[in-house]
Image (cartoon, grey):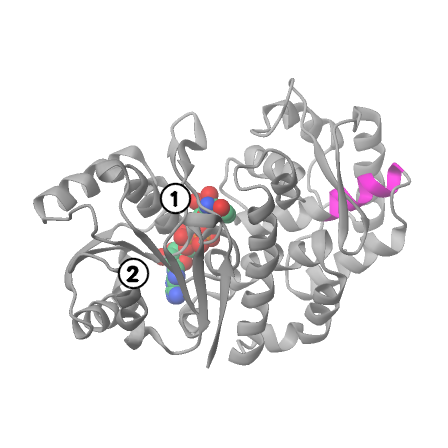
Amino acid sequence: MGVELKVNLGQRSYPIFIVSSQLPHLGRYLIPLSLASRVFVITDEVVGRLYGEQVTRALRDAGFEVLYQELPDGEEYKSLESAGQLYTRALEGGVERRSAMIALGGGVIGDLAGFVAATYMRGVPLVQVPTTLLAQVDSSVGGKVAVNHPLGKNMIGCFYQPRLVFADVATLKTLPLREIRAGLAEVIKYGVIRDKDFFEFLEENLEKILRLDQDVLIEVVKRSCAIKAGIVEKDETEQELRAILNFGHTIGHALEVLTKYRVYRHGEAVAAGMVAAAAIAEEKGLCGPDLTMRLAGILEHAGLPVRIPFKAEEIIEVLPRDKKAQGGWPRFVLPVALGRVVIDADVGRDVIRSALERCRAERGELS
Ligand SMILES: NC(=O)c1ccc[n+]([C@@H]2O[C@H](COP(=O)([O-])OP(=O)(O)OC[C@H]3O[C@@H](n4cnc5c(N)ncnc54)[C@H](O)[C@@H]3O)[C@@H](O)[C@H]2O)c1
């Protein structure tokens, strides 16, 4: 069971395999890449306990020698220090220029192992084996790799495309439901920014997705990756179009900052941020209230927060710190219809204030 997509980036093109229960065959998919026999698997302790052995065996069965490293689980380990440990392990373990680094895990491992692959010996082949819904639909595709700096998330990084992405949706069966929901926020985002039919497919199939129906999940990951790939192909390094992927992220980021990254999973903050962005679009006359209601409806059904538990002024105060701010103020991605958004650099404080206050009046205060 599975499908194949391609990200078309000239010499940096690569396939995305979206499969179910194919992890034992991972090695076979790597053979066409002409890699060195030694590969370096990087994972975290949680994913390692669940899938480390299976992946190692799959690679050995295909003739690879496996160097294997687990890191502790957690965003705080997406750091230069962890990268340093991985460089040492790779050097001591004989990882050479044609050796693949295999990122087995969620977005934390994907970003960290990707950064290490991009910089070790000026770049070695990277294979993404994403095991969270967020990583399968978002972080493993598109080539953004990074580590965090104490002064900001993802501040040290680059663009480095993988040679192959292998997303096995059966791995989502062990993922906590909260993580599935958080990943779904990014999936719903794709429908709003690019594809009304997909949004409607999600509305119709939400229960099946939450039950982890494998056929439906393959379809969800496939359509999400196709949308992201289509955007990345047109604007690999985020000069303009790629910024639409930040829909919901501006207010979402403000929520993460105000709660010191301790309350929301990223997708949860994005969910509330998307509803706020729709309300801002409404306030500016760019869309009608039906869009905001429909978006809030599907997010609530998915078990995601749609309310902003802060006063408008508190949100506005942290907006200049947005990492995508230009000239001290963020550009907003605003929906004009389901499937279409615009980038708006001219969203004033008054508009945000009245939109957020209206949200509070309509949806209440608590998330
Ligand atoms: N590069 C990009 O384009 C991009 C895009 C979005 C997010 N990100 C980054 O992604 C990171 C967040 O990724 P995430 O949400 O996947 O978090 P994560 O990598 O921390 O994974 C979440 C949790 O799930 C566990 N886990 C992973 N797979 C599992 C499985 N199959 N079964 C059971 N448990 C499993 C992990 O051990 C972890 O505890 C952030 O660092 C963010 O900056 C990057």
- Magenta highlight on residue 276: yes
**What are the residue bounds of the magenta stretch?**
275-284
Q: Residue furthest top?
A: 327
Residue that label 1 marks: 75
In terms of depth relative to the viewer, which is nearer, 205 or 137? 137
The amino acid type, in three-letter code, at marker 1 is Glu
Q: Amino acid at mark 2?
A: Leu
Query: Which element is circle 1 on?
Result: helix
| Residues at circles 1 and 2 in contact by the CB criterion of under 8 Å | no
Q: Residue placed at 76% from the left, 57% from the top?
A: 295
From what the image shows, is residue 253 above or below residue 105? above
In the drawing, what numbered circle is on residue 357?
A: none
Q: Is the residue marked 1 within 8 Å of ligand 1, measured from its CB?
A: yes
Q: Earlier in the sequence, mark 1 or mark 2?
A: 2
Q: CA distance from mark 1 to mark 2?
A: 30 Å
Local SS, label 2: helix
Question: Within 10 angstroms of label 1, few (less than 14), some, or many (20 or more) residues?
Answer: some
User: Mark 2 = which residue?
Assistant: 33
Instruction: Name the one closer to the observer, 188 or 245.
Output: 245
Pinpoint residue 306: horizontal percent, then vertical percent. 71, 51
Evaluate whether residue 210 shows in this view.
Answer: no
Magenta region, main secondary structure:
helix
Position of residue 39 measured from the top left corner of the image (x, y, whole percent): 19, 57
What residue is rendered at 41% in x and 47% in y? 161
Instruction: Specify whether 162 is left or right of 80.
Output: right
Residue 54 sits above or below residue 248 on the image: below
Q: Residues within 10 Å of mark 2 (few under 14, many from 20)?
A: few
| Residue 112 image position (x, y, % from top left) | 34, 44
Q: Is residue 163 magenta?
A: no
